[in-house]
Image (cartoon, grey):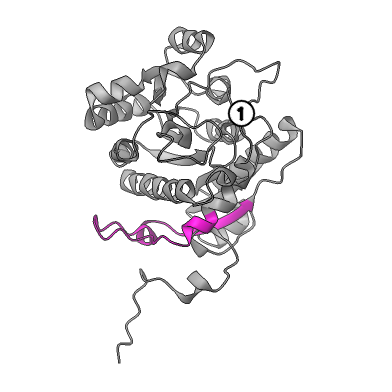
Amino acid sequence: MNTVTDTTMWEGSLHAGSIGSFLNKPRVACKADALRAAGATVAFLGFPWDGTCISRTGTNMGPKGLREASEQFLTFNANTGMDLEQAFTFVDAGDVAIVPGNSVATQQRAEDMVAEILAADAIPVIGGGDHSITIGPARAFARKYRRCGMIHFDTHLDTAQDVGGETLNHCCPIARAVDAGFRPGNIVTIGPSGWMNPRSELAYVRDKGINLFTLEDVWELGVPEVAARAVALASKDVDAVYLTIDIDVLDASQAPGTGVPTPCGMTARELLGIITRLKGAPIRAIDLAEVSPPWDPSGITSRLGMRILLDALAAAAASR
């Protein structure tokens, strides 16, 4: 009888009605002391907020969808040999306690919780939620790492100053990151579609000097070149890089479960091909926004979202 335990093998919890944690990892209070005591080096934080959606709602169910999808994945990649369990100790830090209808209070709570994770020297992995989920966490990140860069995948530029007077809208996270202290020259946006961005947001990108690789740039330059340039630009003279991925950067056929499905967006292979090449960037925070399970009963988008997070964590592990 074989008594050797394979730590990369699935357990019976896959079908046992698990507690619904990220990768079935233990729940730990989102406090620096508790996270340190647990030895956490990666903490998943759900941000179930879609209070600023200008299109289809449902991203408040994103964290639940990602947790459910995570049960189908291992932390070991048999193709590359990467074992995330050897690089990190994972915990689930719960969810941001949303204040319905109140963006200011909700973002402050998110900022405070991410600050606790960063104070424990752990990497926050934030699952949302509309793309305003980047705002509070980015503020905490910029306080922790004064010299910081950002790599941003999105079909949108997200540089609106406000939407109808709301400055914490999901069209505004990159502008708010600049306000928080991210240097525009260290911000790289990849994948925007030309038909889905207003003139004023493009003007902001150009005026501030944010680095932009459009959808057409990805096609023409190719995955390796875009990845190499993104790493160089985001990492130059910085201490840490924040990776934010809006799943609507992907073609709608591959990620239908989102608020603004993109016709002819990036392919999953293009996105993952770039992410796997980000190992040269000092990635110290990751978020995945705009997963909206109600629009994808098959769960394709949530599962792809989990694949994206795992590949992003593999890049972060390599960068350490």
| 58 in relation to 1, above or below | above
* Mark 1 lies on residue: 55
Quadrant of the snapshot with the N terminus:
bottom left
Left or right placement of residue 74 versus residue 277 in this view = right
**Image-quadrant location for residue 74:** bottom left
Nearer to me, 243 or 245: 245
Residue 246 in view in this figure: no
Identify residue type, mark 1.
Ser
Name the residue located 56 percent from the left edge and 43 percent from the top edge. Answer: 295
Residue 144 in view in this figure: yes
Q: Residues within 10 Å of mark 1 (few under 14, many from 20)?
A: few
Judged from this view, the residue extending furthest toward the bottom is 1
Residue 159, image x, y percentages: 53, 18
Residue 81, image x, y percentages: 25, 58
Name the residue located 46 percent from the left edge and 7 percent from the top edge. Answer: 207
Nearer to me, 144 or 42: 42
Residue 121, image x, y percentages: 50, 48
Q: Which residues are magenta?
A: 67-94
